[in-house]
Amino acid sequence: MAAPSASVDTAARYVAAFGRDAILAEGRRAVENGDYRWATQVLHHLVFADPEDTTAKKLQADAYEQMGYQAEGPQWRGIFLTAAKELREGIAPAVFATASTDTIAGMPVDILFDFAAVHVIGEKAADADVWFDVEFTDLGETWTVWIRHGVLNARPGATNPPLTVRAAKVLAAAILLTPAAAKGLLAEGKIAVSGDPSVLDDYAAVLDEFDPDFPVVTP
C-alpha cells in the first residue's frame, strides 16, 4: 500500500490540531466575506483529510466558482471552474485524447522520440540497458534508441543493435508508445523485425501509461 502524500498527511495534522468544526467555520466565514482564495486554502485541509466531507467540498467548490467568475484570464478561469466541478461531481472521465493518432503521426521524428521518452519510468529504467534501431520505411530514415540510467535517448543513424524494427512512421509510433502492439502488427505483416524481439519486452517493462482522469483539487 502506498504511503499517503505529504499533502494528505499535513491536512490530517491540521485537522487534528485545530479541529474540523473550527476550520470549516473559518472557511465559511472567508466565503461570506469574499475572501475566496483564503477559503480554498483553509478548506483544502478538510478535503484532503477526508475526501468524503461533502460539506467542506461544497463550500470549497463555491469559493473556486467565485474565483473563476472573477478571473480575467481564460486559463485561470478554466482551472478554477474545473476545480469547482470536480469537488461537486467527482473526476469526469476524459472524452478525448490530446495525443491522437493524427497528432502523433504529424510529429517530427525527434519530437516523437521525446514524446516516447516522457513515458519512461525513471525508477524502473534505472538499471535498464535497452538498445534497438527503428527504420522508418516511409521516410528512408533509421534512428537508434537506447535507454540507460533511466533515460531514453535517440539519434539518427543505424547501429548494430540486438533488434531492428522496420515500419512506417505511424506504426513505428504505435510500437514506441505501446510495444505490445508489435506482435499483432508483425503477425499481420505490417512491420518487420530482425534480431531479438524480447528487447521490446524489456522496453515495455519501463514504460508508463498516462491516465488522463487525474484529480485537480482532491487527493
Image: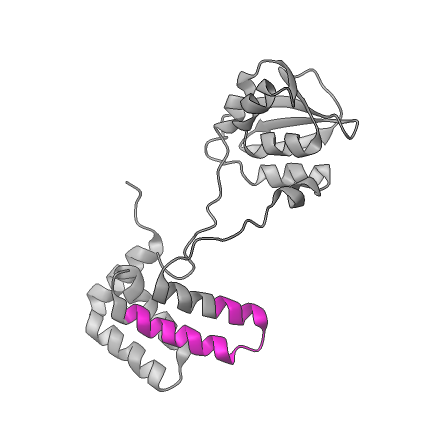
For image coordinates 50% across by 53% down, the residue present is 95
What colour scheme was applied to this rendering of the protein?
one colour
**What's drawn in magenta, residue-wise?**
56-80
The one nearer the camera, 38 or 215, is: 215
The one nearer the camera, 140 or 205, is: 140
For image coordinates 31% across by 56% down, the residue present is 8
Above or below residue 37? Residue 193 is: above
Residue furthest front in the image = 188
Quadrant showing the N terminus: top left
Quadrant showing the C terminus: bottom left
Residue furthest right in the image = 140
Above or below residue 2? Residue 206 is: above
Above or below residue 196? Residue 97 is: below
Question: Does residue 64 show up magenta in the picture?
Answer: yes
Name the spot of residue 57 as percent of width and height, x first: 31, 68
Name the spot of residue 152 as percent of width and height, x first: 60, 33
The prevailing secondary structure element of the residues shown in magenta is helix
